[in-house]
Structures are given as C-alpha cells and as structure tokens.
Image: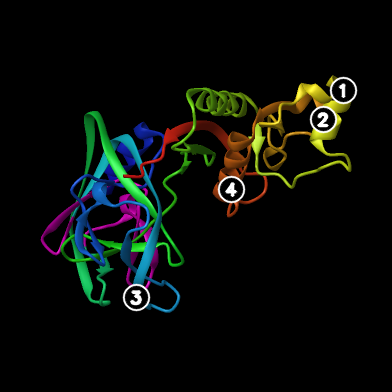
Amino acid sequence: MNSGFNKAANSAGVKPSCFVAGTLVMAVAGMVAIEKIKSGDKVISTDPETMETSPKTVLETYIREVTTLVHLTVNGEEIVTTVDHPFYVKNQGFIKAGELIVGDELLDVNGNVLLVENFDVELTDEPVKVYNFKVEDFHTYHVGENGVWVHNSNCKLIKNDDGTYDAELSYKEDWTPGQRAEADAKCKALSKADTAKTIPERGSTSASKKYKNEYGENSVLKTQDVDHTIDLQLGGIDDIHNMNPLDKSVNRSLGSQIAYLIKNLDYGTVLRNFKMVDQKNL
C-alpha cells in the first residue's frame, strides 16, 4: 500500500495537513463536523507530554484545496485526511498519515488502542477542500466517532519533497482590497527571492529613519510602516534598497505570521513560495 502513497506524494509535491469536510471533531459541545469548527470553540485536546486531556480553545481555522488524499480505516471507521497530517501511534509519537501502515496502534481520547485496518491513497480529478485548525497549549484534537488522537499540525507550512518549504499566510478579515493587494505583492517579492531562515542582522538606525532620511519625512504615510521587502528573518539585508512603505496592519500581521511559521525550523532552511489565503472564521 505505501508504495502507492510514495508515488502519489511525489506527484503531489506539497502536502498540507488537514481533513475533508464531514470529519467529526470531539468538541465540548459534542461531535462537530470540522468545517463547522470556528475560532473560540472548545475542543477536547490531549497533552503529548503528560497525557492529560482537557478542553482547549480553537485559535484559528484554515481551509484550502488538495488533490491527494489518504483513506484510513480505523476500527471500522473511514477517516480521510491529507498525507502529512500527524496521527499519534502508541510508543512512537506522531506519525504522518502517509507513513502509517496496517496494524499501527493509534490512541483514542481515553488512551485505548485503535487499529489501522486499511490504508489507501486517492489522487482526485478536481481539488478537494480540506480543513484544519490551531488549538491552544496542547496543539492536538480528536477526530471521528472513535476519537482518534491527531496533532493540529502546521497546515500553513508545507514541506516539499526537496526539503524546502512553502508558506501560506492569512489575510485579515477586515482588510480592504488595497491591503490584500499589498499582502499579495509582498508574497510575490518573497517568492522571487532566495529566502531562508536567518538570524536577523539589523543596524543601529531604524528602517523608518533610514528611509525618511533618503526620501523625506513625507515619503511614509501615517498608515504605513517602512518594511524590509525581504524580511531580515528570511535573509533580507537592512539596506535602503530592501525597504518600502507598507500598510501597518499588513506589515505587522505578515511579519508575526512568518516568525511563528519558521520558529521551529533550523537556521538555513529554505522557504520557496509564499501565498496569501483566506482565514476561515465562521
């Protein structure tokens, strides 16, 4: 079976971690379809360190499209997920769905064993919407009638087969078309550059002061920051040629999102493509 997965994964290129619509999530309010989960909801989460289970808040939700799906049969129930979504395997920890094998022992919300009974991969003719969300503290939740334990993963940092990463950043709900266009342009510039996680090297003079000294006090609006077009944390240089005015909300949101996405990557890790997506807050 896994030879089929390898072929599909290679052709897919990138592998976001999510579930298809209709996948049930164990929430405090009961079993809820994943596409109905929204920020602020309470879901049942388990701490991988202590095995403590308690309600935790959903911080952010995501929706995207993929063309490669993994079908798992777990204790008689089919779960359809993406190839990189991590499932907890007894005595092993979190393992990507595409690397599971028949006979693997997953765990439910009470720590009981659930067996992987079948594994199959599907390449869809058309893109399929898939869903995920971020959980506070433990970063895990439970899916399906059996309450299979999974990690919330990082649906917005996508590993490529060559070890590089693609990154998805979210528009804020209240952004205007102009702000969204600025965010798109920022991502386009990052995608064209040679970006990698880097220890930032910043001079003693702020970007704003440098830019205004060069172009004048009125060159930056009150609604703008002076942005490093290629972020310092991605290998950009602290130089006037790498600076441009950018909407404050866009600058601060994208900067913090990038910092969060790359925080656990090794220095030198290459990021290849950057893309803006809608944040799903129902």
In reply to whether residue 91 is colored magenta, the answer given is yes
Q: Which amino acid does label 3 sit on?
A: Thr
Q: Which of marks 2 and 3 is nearer the N terminus?
A: 3
User: Residue 246 in magenta?
Assistant: no
C-alpha span from label 3 to label 4: 28 Å
Q: Give the amino acid type for the residue marked by disc 2 in the picture.
A: Asp
- Name which of mark 3 and mark 1 comes first in the sequence: 3
User: Which mark is first along the chain, 4 or 2?
Assistant: 2
Report whether residue 217 is seen.
Answer: yes
Distance of mark 3 from mark 1, alpha carbons?
A: 56 Å
Look at discs 3 and 1 and give the one toward the viewer. 1
Q: In this view, does 214 lie above or below 270?
A: above
- Residue at mark 4: 262
Closer to viewer: mark 1 or mark 4: 1
Report the residue marked by disc 2.
239
Residue indicated by mark 3: 53
- Which label's residue is closer to the chain start, 1 or 4? 1
The segment highlighted magenta reads 73-102
Amino acid bearing label 4 = Ile
What whole-number distance in Å separates the C-alpha atoms at marks 1 and 2? 11 Å
Up-down relation of residue 272 to residue 260 (above or below) = above
Q: Which amino acid does label 1 sit on?
A: Glu
Q: Nearer the viewer, residue 114 or 156?
A: 156
